[in-house]
Image (spheres, grey):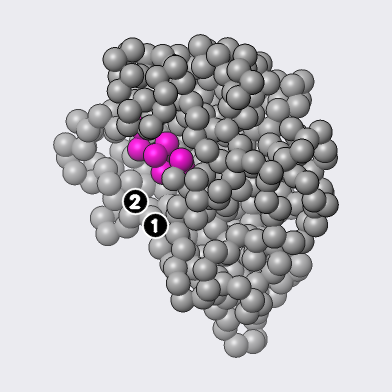
Amino acid sequence: MLITEQIDPKAPFPTLSRRLRLGVVGGGRISTMQVMAARLTDHWELVAGAFSSDPARAKAAATDWRLPEDRCYTSFAAMAEGEANRRDGVDAVMITTPNHLHFDAAKCFLEAGIDVLCDKPLTNNTAEADTLVNLCERTGCVFGVSYVMSCFPMIRQARDIVARGGLGRINQIHVEFMQDWMTPEDVTDAPHVKWRLDPAKSGRTSCVGDIGTHAAHLAGFVSHLTLTHVRSEFHVCGAPKPLEDSFFAWTRHDNMVPGTLMATRLAPGNRGGLRLRIFGSEGGLEWDLEACDTLRFNRFGEPDRVVSRGHGHGVSRDTERFVRTARGFPEGIIEAWANLYTEFAMAVACRRDGRDEPADWLAMPRVTEGADGVRFVDACVTSNDQSGAWVSL
């Protein structure tokens, strides 16, 4: 058994009887960050990877990642087969490839009975996303999606405040994600940028599928309201590009709650400019990624409050599970990734042990939320193609 104790849904996460074995499919900058975060949890060890279809590069990757050569594969299909047939094979894989490879890679590992955590967007079309949802239902595999912004402690605190009625009846939701890294005119020459602007790899969008999906997911995650309609416009605000570098959208959630979503990569001075604001009949919440350790929570007619990440001081017990340092000692994006990999580890351990997850224990994004993100992208494309018409999800 991986979990040898009784699970208390309100207590800290249990220690596993062994580290879970993790594989990497991809190998770019984001995989390095995710492996670092997975190791931080002490629930995972890296044991295998499919880093390149070129044998020489795969061999070199073995040295870079400190892995034996026979655990560095030249295709994810070979990795899925090879690891499934090993007694010490991977328990799960992370998929960090360009978008167009997500579906085939995920499908291979699910069919081999191996759990998956995949980057977003889940796939480049809804048919593939629905296929993965159905595969998960058929195989019973755990499938997480890397909407990592939902794993910051103060976002979990905000979600808890909304669930407890702290805002009253929600009446509007606003999310913006402003970055500046595409501002230079020659940025499209960079290798890590080219695929993001190639429709054959990135899909029908660039900015929307990449950072816009984070904004859309965060709005629903914290508000507990489903996005139902979108009206969007795509723009190329800088040097000519085959896909949009900015988009602006009006949204409607359950009960016709209105809102806005905005995302761009051409906002000089903004790096991690993700900002969430939710307002209700009795109060409001505001969170800023670049000041991620604090959450503004204001009740109308009462003194303003700033909730700080840290043990105690009013944060919920669910939030405290994701806190590693005291107030005043900052945490950041690596710790948020670690929170995602902690919940993923708990879900994988439960499946491997043949036990059900306790209700409301894990809030990590799942394959169904990934499929919702693909439908959001499709709706934005359709709306833009129809000159900003309202489109139902």
Q: Where residue 199 appears, x then y in whole percent? A: 38, 22
Residue 20 appears anywhere in the view: yes
Is 59 included in the stretch rendered in magenta? no
Is residue 142 toward the left or the right of residue 243 in the image? right
Q: Which numbered disc, 1 or 2, marks the residue that appears first in the sequence?
A: 2
Q: Which residues are magenta?
A: 28-35
Q: Which residue is mark 1?
A: 273
At label 1, which amino acid type do we have? Gly
Q: Where residue 4 appears, x then y in whole percent? A: 78, 46
Q: Where residue 387 appears, x then y in whole percent? A: 46, 35
Name the residue located 46 percent from the left edge and 40 percent from the top edge: 35
Quarter holding the C terminus?
top right
Name the residue located 58 percent from the left edge and 12 percent from the top edge: 81
Is residue 130 toward the left or the right of residue 192 in the image? right
Q: Quadrant of residue 164?
A: bottom right
Name the residue located 64 percent from the left edge and 41 percent from the top edge: 18
For mark 1, does the 10 Å Cα neighbourhood hold few (<14), some (14 to 19), or many (20 or more) residues? many
**Are the residues flagged by discs 1 and 2 in contact, CB closer than 8 Å?**
yes
Q: Which residue is mark 2?
A: 179
Q: Nearer the viewer, residue 41 or 257?
A: 41
Q: Where residue 366 appears, x then y in whole percent? A: 66, 38
Quarter holding the N terminus?
top right
Q: Nearer the viewer, residue 65 or 289?
A: 65
Q: Secondary structure at mark 1?
A: strand
Name the residue located 52 percent from the left edge and 38 percent from the top edge: 45
Magenta highlight: main SS: helix
Instruction: Report, in whole angstroms, how far the alpha carbon at label 1 lies from the one at label 2.
Output: 6 Å
